[in-house]
Image (spheres, rainbow, N blue to C red):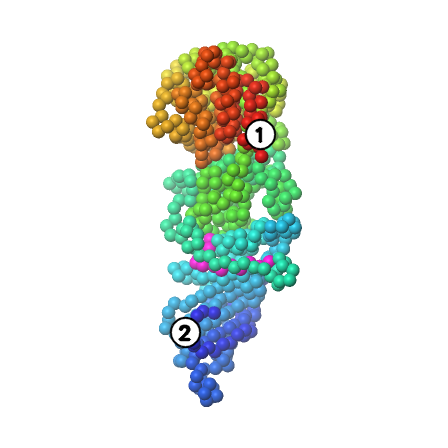
Amino acid sequence: MFSTTSKSDLIIIDGLSVHAALGSSHWPRPGVEQKLQPLLLSVTVPHNLSQAGVVDNLEESVSYGSICKVAEACAHEKGKFSSVESLAAGIANSCFTKFPSIHEVQSVIEKQRALLHAQGAGVQTLHRRTGEKEEVVYFVRDLELSTIIGLHPWERVEKQLVRINLRWTLASDDPTLPSTGFDFRGLVARVSDLVIDSSYQTVESLAGSIAQSALESGHGIESVTVRVGKPSALMMAKTAAVQITRSWKDFPELSRGSLPRALAVTPPNEGHVAILALGSNMGDRFGHIEKALKMLEAEGVKVLDTSFLYETKAMYHEDQAAFANGACAIHTYLASTELLALLKRVEEQVGRTPTFRNGPRVVDLDIIFYDDLSMDVPDGNLPLQIPHVRLREREFVLRPLADSQNTHPNSPSLSARATHPDAPSHAPLPPNPPFSHSAAPPHCTWGSQTLLMATLNTTPDSFSDGGDHDQLSTALLYVQHSLASGAQIIDIGGYSTRPRAEVVTVEEEINRVVPFIRALREHDESVVISVDTFRGRVAREAILAGASWINDVRAGRGEYLNSPVQQDGPTTFDVSYEFGCPIILMHSREAAHEDKSYPEGVLQGVQQELGARIQEALKAGVRRWNIIVDPGYGFSKSVDGNVELVRNLKHLSTPDNFPILAGTSRKSYLGSIVGGKAEKDAKERDWATAAAVGACVQAGADIVRVHNVAAMKDVITVADKIWRRK
């Protein structure tokens, strides 16, 4: 109970059973007249009992009998009170009217049949004759639910009972409650959904999530006390429990005032920005996710940014295939409920059919955030809770959210709750996007090992192997040898990027690469083919011929400024978006042998300039999970600048964690360092290349692009064993 005047005498009525038609019961039926339901009343009145104790006579005095009659009369007064709050106020006012000597009334009113899974719910109040603002504490008693909880292996197999008790107060500035009083059912439904679908290891974590969920529920809760008990935890004890009290001050990041914008992206002036969770674990998982996004875009939804993609084990029903999971920020003019309806239509169009709860699905689209709103629409065919009620426990949602730092103003710390910040991301590697019929196309797992990319230059003037593979027969032999030696990716280029190389027309470049790509694809359906081009038209023809990736040394800028070739047609960004294929964005300036000045340091300069290209790619619709970055060794960098980029490669994509390609093979800066024949003959630089490649692997390169595949395979195998594999 509330504190009273020190050493005050009390008249107490405890556990008075009455019946009243007071709100809905545990089986509410809209439109049906409210029925009588049991209430349990307790009333405490501070009152001086000294005189009654002396004369042993209750005449003309306040007694527990008279107070009981007042309480019963109020409870039985049909139609006057519609909530536990109004009944408590009515009892207090009646006591003040009938007994002038009473100045304070404390009451507890509990509805015993209001909630299906709880023993009771109600309110504890303190009213004063002076009219001072009453004190009100709400409670839910013994909410019993079943969930997976516990550290031991046997506790992860079967759900067990948890018993939850809640007590909370409302903010003093909260709007007036409706006539029906506080929405106990709505809050308990929110908590129940969270608990039932959770799988926490500790009751401490579960209690913390319940507390934060209550604060974020939109019910105006200022402070909440949560007690979570496990009756089955201890053999010789009735229960084992923890109890915590949390308020807004315990979550300083949960702003209740003027809310900042919710997203890392800049919202348009009109419409809404929402964050969606994406998932699939059936068939072409990556293709299903991309198809769903394309369908949303066809309906006028703009994809502003995406996360990387992650492969995660099924969380609730574990006997099913692993999921591909991601997230995206979108702009839409649809209301939240309209957006939800659109997502469900798209799921059906992609191929999702009803299964059991938390079962396998072709595609899964969920609204995580919508502007800065907090809302709960539990009724109807499409219930909606924003932020998503089970967000805090889902690593497969939190990790993608952290990629683009998307947060909600009522839960800005959520993106930081990923428990595995170094979790490997995945990128789709479709062998032939337009024509692939594979049920589960291959994909790349970043971070598990260093991938080996073999160069195939079909040019007569490349700096290292010009003219070696410009015939189809010799090119195929080179590819076969490279694949046998351990290459996973073949990078085919038809335009030399060496300084002062001859300008090649678009048509000539297409003629140089497309026949080779087509022949290679016919020879090997599964090999990953990268087309080395900065021209969108060439990239598109190459993809149609069977290429999987685009390797763009110009990072989407197209023709060089001084090029006589006119810029026309799509950009490489456009092609990557059209086919949903990965694209490598390399740092470069205009002339590779010029403009080597970086006033703020080469690493920071490359980060800033490459970061600007990444932003342009995202604006053009390129998915974050399809972007790979390349520092551009040998392009507008001094010898020392190249060395600095090798040494600090691990910092290149910090904190964005884009996968990195290191193309340091046989570069001229290596020849300058070692001197001798290697300074003039690129093929003499393999030993120097080995040292640089080993350093790049140590620094976290995900792909190394090399000329001598067999030798560099040995280098990365040993380097991976030392630095990467656990």
Name the residue type under label 2.
Thr
Give the camera-side residue of 483 and 220: 483
* Quadrant of the snapshot with the C terminus: top right
Per the image, the residue denoted by label 1 is 721
The answer to whether mark 1 and mark 2 are in CB contact below 8 A is no
Query: Badge 2: how crowded within 10 Å, few (<14), some, or many (20+)?
Result: few
Residue numbers of the magenta segment: 215-230
Measuring from the top left, give residue 706's x and y in whole percent: 52, 20
Residue at position x 48%, y 21% in the image: 664
Residue at the extreme left: 599
Per the image, the residue denoted by label 2 is 5
Q: Is residue 367 visible?
A: yes
Q: Which of the 4 image quarters holds residue 451?
A: top right
Q: Gap in Å between the C-alphas at discs 1 and 2?
A: 73 Å
Measuring from the top left, give residue 344's x and y in whole percent: 55, 43
Say whether residue 223 is magenta: yes
Say whether residue 633 is magenta: no
Q: Is residue 564 above or below residue 138?
A: above
Instruction: Please identify, in this view, whether the residue under mark 1 or under mark 2 is nearer the observer.
Output: 1
Name the side, left or right, on which 123 lies relative to 270. Answer: right
| SS at circle 1 | helix
Name the residue type under label 1.
Lys
Residue at position x 43%, y 84% in the image: 50
Measuring from the top left, give residue 672's x and y in whole percent: 43, 16
Q: Is residue 346 visible?
A: no
**Label whose residue precedes the other's in the sequence (1 or 2):** 2
Residue at position x 45%, y 59% in the image: 223
Measuring from the top left, give residue 77's x and y in whole percent: 50, 74
